[in-house]
Image: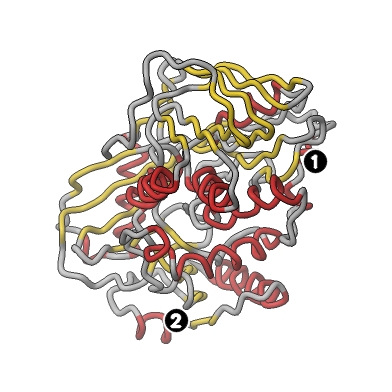
Amino acid sequence: MSAIVTAPTVTGPVRADVAIVGGGVAALSAAVTLKKAGLSVVLMEKRLCGAGASGVNFGGVRQQGREFVELPLSARSRKLWDGLSKFLGEDVEFEATGHIKLARSEADLAELERYAETAREWGLDLTMLGPNAVHDALPWLGERVVGASLSPTDGQANPRLVGPAYARLARRLGVDVREHTPVTGATRTADGFVVEAAGVTVHARYLVNAAGAGGGLVASAFGEPVPVSPLMPNMLVTEPLPYFVERSIGVVGGDVYVRQIRRGNVIFGGGSGWRDAATDLARPVTEQSLGGMARTLHLVPGLVEAQVIRSWSGIDGQMPDHIPVVGPSSTTPGLVHAFGFSGHGFQLGPAIGMILAELVLDGRTESPIAPFAITRFKDWAGGPGEAVTHVEH
């Protein structure tokens, strides 16, 4: 992943309408939207834009399987994905291949049926497939699969491309994008915010907190502690193979997910990686990778001779209730939050950025964000919650 810009070693105070902490898809989408609306924007990312949770995930662009309260935001974002490559001026390899969630038991199939019934009330139509139908559609599936639900409009994209493409568009528009610029402090003053970061002090009227797993630290600085904890996907990819996995594949329980890109590489994951607290970097875990391989072979036995050529992990932020914090601060005027996407923020990112921009520009949004209010943790006494072993990204 190439650098967008190298921040200057020393820079004097910078003034802007909006300061953004974080360089993921949601943060960059907000930066682009705000700049197009005529505001000056400084975005600060501690490493490279799109290299955090936005860049290490599975690449699923799925509505299926989400918490129901996320579906309106997911539907808004799905419309943006259709034109995203044209909007960004670069091909981010989005394909509406459909997302199919597999059942490996009758109990799983009953769960899919219950989800599909309620999802329809939220505007998401899923197609149920019985054992014969799913094996006719995907004849390479293993025998354990007894049914599935299909979301034909969902799909997949390349997460390594989307964030950097957004960053390059932001820079072309005139956003002050500063990579390798970790934020060290932020305070509210009489006329806005002062953000201290490596080599620069930014004065801004508004502050957007889209700092991923670090979003809780920013919120805490303004009197809003939240129980966000790290989540590390455990991902692998094979050598190029003849193309045959035409759908993006998930399972009930989320312990394995599979897709194949047009070049032939099969990407799959499951389990959790390892985080080094000293460096704040994550690595895959061998035992988790072996488990993911075994589960994948149960679904796709034809991969038994495939060679895994790379594995990786990264860090996302997760909340105890597995939905993000999105919305205005409850303590500080001019501050808006979007973090803790709990492993499934990639698809939401383009729309979340627009929602953040609406909150800055208008103080409100038409999208239903009440379930994601940071105030739901105001009296939280349960800690960060139990670690989730399996999340379909």
**378 left or right of 255 in image:** right
- The residue depicted at 30 percent of the width and 50 percent of the height is 293
Q: Earlier in the sequence, mark 2 or mark 1?
A: 2
Q: Which tag is nearer the camera, tag 2 or tag 1? A: 1
- The residue depicted at 79 percent of the width and 22 percent of the height is 190
Tag 2 residue: 131
Label 1 secondary element: helix
User: Which is nearer the eye, 259 or 6?
Assistant: 6
Please state the horizontal and vertical placement of residue 370, each as a whole percent of the image.
Answer: 78, 52
Q: Quadrant of residue 206?
A: top right
Tag 1 residue: 376
Three-letter residue code for mark 1: Arg
Residue 57, can we see it?
no
Three-letter residue code for mark 2: Pro
Q: Is residue 104 above or below residue 362?
A: below
Q: Is residue 152 above or below residue 241?
A: below
Categorize mark 1 by other alpha carbons within 10 Å: few (<14), some (14-19), many (20+).
Answer: few
Q: Is residue 28 above or below residue 262?
A: above
User: Which is nearer the eye, 334 or 315?
Assistant: 334
User: Which is nearer the eye, 251 or 328?
Assistant: 328
On residue 82, the disc is: none
Categorize mark 2 by other alpha carbons within 10 Å: few (<14), some (14-19), many (20+).
Answer: some
- The residue depicted at 56 percent of the width and 37 percent of the height is 317
